[in-house]
Amino acid sequence: MLTNSVTTYGAVTKSFHWLIALLILTMIPLGIYANGLPFDTGEQLARKAWLFSLHKTIGVAIFFTALARITWAISQPKPGLLNADKKLESFLAELVHWLLYASLILVPLTGWVHHAATTGFAPIWWPFGQSLPFVPKDEHVAQTFSSLHIIFERVLVVAILLHVAGALKHHVIDKDVTLKRMLPGTTEPDALPAQHKSMTPAFGAVGIYAAALLIGTSLGLFSSHEHEHSHDHSEAALRQHLPLILQQLQKAAGRCRTARFPSL
């Protein structure tokens, strides 16, 4: 079954879910790893730039996949919660879903704007250019969206952890089919409790994002003289040493041209 029903998820929704999960579980560790790499030599700089390009390209892929996922979700019936009769649990479940949907758009978008506002290195691997409409090459814009990117990324990580914890609770403690409904095949619950539609979780997600922004501001992330986001420093260092990166890549290309390979 490709489409959703009021009791279970279809194959398209499941495919979107696990594809985005795979991309996120690749992108976040990759970004952390790339940030921590040294850049003392041309070879190290070239490696760091390559990993940043991969990180950014995956981020753009997540952005468009998330847009498609949300568009599909709007067109489909939403399977009911199996714990809808537990008001607090159902509220938290809906709240985390709102946080996830928002984060899947905001995290890659703010990173993309940051990239477009810098003059730089580590391009996104696609044929449509590195700029965005209405985004100037401006250090203040880059700094602002770099701060937003790191704040929203933290919200995304917390939302993912809560989402996983909730799924495991359903599977291990409640022993219902909430997790199984997102696995391959068709799993129907025995019965659905009465559902309660409310926008309160959405407003709660907005409140959490507002609180995250306030915390980020209090930590000085938007202050030009205190802004010390490691991603910015890594990019600045890489831009500064771009000639070394190109030189290293040219040497690598030269070695490939002169290398002798055994005949097959």
Image: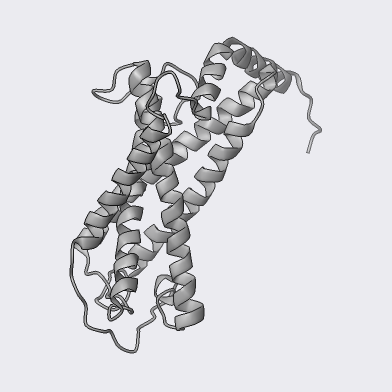
Residue extending furthest toward the bottom: 190
| Residue 30 point in image, percent of width and height | 56, 41
Q: Residue at x 51, y 44 (%)?
A: 28
| Residue 247 point in image, percent of width and height | 64, 12
Q: Is residue 97 left or right of residue 255?
A: left
Residue 127 can be seen in this image: no
**Residue 9 image-quadrant placement:** bottom left
| Residue 122 point in image, percent of width and height | 50, 25
Looking at the image, residue 241 lies above or below residue 64: above
Residue extending furthest toward the front: 218
Q: Residue at x 62, y 33 (%)?
A: 36
**Residue 107 image-quadrant placement:** top left
Residue in the foreground of this view, choosing between 228 and 170:
228
Image quarter where the N terminus lies is bottom left
| Residue 220 point in image, percent of width and height | 41, 29
Looking at the image, residue 19 lies above or below residue 257: below
Residue 195 can be seen in this image: yes
Looking at the image, residue 153 lies above or below residue 233: below
Q: Residue at x 44, y 45 (%)?
A: 154
Q: Residue at x 45, y 23 (%)?
A: 226
Residue in the foreground of this view, choosing between 176 and 154:
154
Total marks placed: 0
Q: How is the image coloured?
A: one colour
Image quarter where the C terminus lies is top right
